[in-house]
C-alpha cells in the first residue's frame, strides 16, 4: 500500500485483488466500512471486469473524459467484493490522469484509492500533507502539487435517461450533458435518505474539515474597495475579488478571480491555517455557479467544511 498522486488529490492505493490491503485502507484512514471505494483502472478496457455493460451515453463520457477527473457509478458485476462497494449493487470507476498512478496500475492491476487523508479531514494535494497526517509512517510517491486540487466529479450513470452528479468536481453539468447528449443534474440533499438509503454513502459524513472554523463572508464592498467586515486577527481571509478588508491584521490570500487556482490552493490553505494555529477561516462568498466550471465543486467543499451543507 502506498500513497500516489493523481490529477485531483493524493490517493491511498491498494491493489483490488489484495483483500488485506483493501481492509488496511479502512483501518488507516479510520474510514466507515459503509463508505465505498473508487476502483481506478488504466483504461476503458478494464471496465468490464467490474461493471455490467454501460449505456452508450456513459461510454461517450469515458471516451472523452478518461483519463480525467471523472468517476462513473455503474451497475457492478456480482463478484466485485462487498468491502469495495460497501455492499451496494453499484461500483465507482475512474481512469486517473497522472502518469505515476497509471504506471502503478499497469504493473499491479486496478487499484482502490480513496483520498489519502484521515477520514473527515481535507484531502492531500501535496506529498507533505500525507507525511504530516501520518507522521511519516506511510510511503508517499511525491508527484508534486496536484493539478486540480479537488476530488473527481462522481456521476451516477445507471439511468440512461438522466445522469446525476453525486459529488461535483472539475467537470460540470454543461460539459457532461454536452458530451453524453442526455440531461445531467446535481443530486439534491433532500434525496439523501430514500427507500434505498443514501445514494452515495460518502455524503452523510463530515468532510474536508480543518480544525479552524470556516465561514462565508459576504462579498460586499465600500465604494473605495475595502471589505465591510471586522474580523478577529487570528484569521485567514480568502478573497477572490480585489480589495482589502478594513481594520484587519490577519492573513489575506487573494486569488483575483482565478477560481482554478482557488481550487488548487483550498485544502493547502486549510491545512496551513491549522499548522500555524489560526482559529478562523473566512471565505468570500462565491459568485453565480455558472460563471466557472469549478464553482459548484468549490461551493460544495467549502459548505461542507463550514458544516452547513444543503
Ligand atoms: O479524485 C478522486 O476521486 C480521488 C482520487 C484519489 O482518485 N478519490 C476519492 O476517493 O476522492 P474517496 O474514497 O475519498 O471518495 C469517493 C467517493 C465517496 O464519497 C464515496 O461514497 C463515493 O465516491 N462512492 C464510491 N463508490 C460509490 C458507489 N458505488 N455509489 C455511490 N457513491 C460511491
Ligand atoms: Mg475522500
Image (cartoon, rainbow, N blue to C red):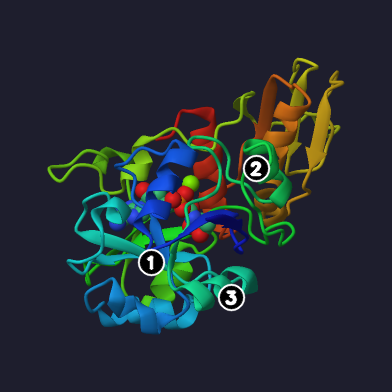
Instruction: Give the Cα separation between the discs numbered 3 and 1.
Output: 17 Å
**Which residue is denoted by mark 3 in the rendering?**
103
Q: Is residue 91 above or below residue 264?
A: below
Quarter of the image for residue 37 reads bottom left
Q: Residues within 10 Å of mark 2 (few under 14, many from 20)?
A: many
Q: Which residue is mark 1?
A: 93
Q: Residue at x 34, y 77 (%)?
A: 47
Count neighbours of disc 1 (C-alpha within 10 A) and say few if under 14, some if 14 to 19, many if 20 or more: many
In the rendered view, would you say 265 is above or below 155?
Answer: above
Q: Evaluate whether residue 169 shows in this view.
A: no
The residue carrying mark 2 is 267
Q: Which of the marked residues, 3 or 1, is nearer the chain's N terminus?
A: 1
**Image spot of residue 131 (x, y percent):** 69, 43
Q: Can residue 174 be seen?
A: yes
Indicate which disc, 2 or 3, sits on the residue closer to the N terminus: 3
Gap in Å between the C-alphas at discs 2 and 3? 26 Å
Q: Secondary structure at mark 1?
A: strand
How far separated are the C-alphas under marks 2 and 1? 24 Å
Helix, strand or loop at mark 3: helix
Foreground residue, 242 or 13? Answer: 13
Q: Which mark is residue 35?
A: none
Displayed quadrant of residue 91:
bottom left
Dots 2, 3 in contact, CB < 8 A: no
Q: Position of residue 42 (x, y in %)?
A: 48, 77
Residue farthest to the left, as pictured: 195
Q: Report x, y in % for residue 184.
A: 35, 64
Name the residue nearer the viewer: 190 or 71. Answer: 71
Left or right: 144 as drawn, with respect to 44: right
Q: Are marks 2 and 1 in contact (CB under 8 Å)?
A: no
For the residue labelled by badge 2, is the local secondary structure a helix, a strand or a loop? helix
Amino acid at each position: 500500500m502506498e500513497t500516489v498522486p493523481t490529477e485531483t488529490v493524493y490517493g491511498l492505493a491498494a491493489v483490488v485483488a489484495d483483500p488485506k490491503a483493501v481492509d488496511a485502507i479502512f483501518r488507516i484512514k479510520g474510514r466507515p466500512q459503509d463508505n465505498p471505494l473508487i476502483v481506478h483502472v488504466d483504461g476503458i478496457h478494464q471496465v468490464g471486469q467490474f461493471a455490467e455493460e454501460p449505456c452508450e451515453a456513459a461510454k461517450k463520457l469515458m471516451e472523452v473524459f478518461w483519463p480525467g477527473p471523472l468517476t462513473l457509478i455503474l451497475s457492478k458485476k456480482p463478484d466485485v467484493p462487498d468491502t469495495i462497494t460497501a455492499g451496494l449493487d453499484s461500483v465507482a470507476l475512474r481512469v486517473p490522469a497522472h502518469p505515476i498512478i497509471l504506471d502503478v496500475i499497469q504493473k499491479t492491476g486496478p487499484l482502490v484509492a480513496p483520498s489519502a487523508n484521515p477520514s473527515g479531514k481535507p484531502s492531500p494535494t501535496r506529498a507533505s500533507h500525507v507525511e504530516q497526517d501520518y507522521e511519516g509512517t506511510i510511503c508517499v510517491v511525491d508527484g508534486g502539487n496536484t493539478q486540480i486540487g479537488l476530488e473527481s466529479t462522481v456521476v451516477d450513470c445507471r439511468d440512461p435517461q438522466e445522469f446525476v452528479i453525486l459529488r461535483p468536481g472539475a467537470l460540470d453539468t454543461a460539459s457532461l450533458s454536452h458530451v453524453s447528449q442526455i440531461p445531467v443534474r446535481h443530486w439534491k440533499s433532500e434525496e439523501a435518505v430514500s427507500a434505498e438509503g443514501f445514494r452515495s454513502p460518502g455524503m452523510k459524513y463530515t468532510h474536508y474539515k480543518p480544525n479552524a472554523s470556516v465561514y462565508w463572508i459576504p462579498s460586499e464592498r465600500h465604494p473605495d474597495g475595502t471589505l465591510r467586515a471586522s474580523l478577529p486577527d487570528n484569521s485567514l481571509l480568502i478573497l477572490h475579488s480585489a480589495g482589502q478588508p478594513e481594520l484587519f491584521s490577519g492573513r489575506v490570500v487573494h486569488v483575483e478571480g482565478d477560481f482554478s487556482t482557488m481550487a488548487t490552493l483550498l485544502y493547502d490553505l486549510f491545512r496551513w491555517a491549522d499548522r500555524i494555529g489560526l482559529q478562523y477561516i473566512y471565505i468570500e462568498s462565491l459568485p453565480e455557479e455558472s460563471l466557472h466550471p469549478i464553482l459548484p465543486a468549490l461551493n460544495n467543499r467549502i459548505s461542507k467544511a463550514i458544516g452547513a451543507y444543503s
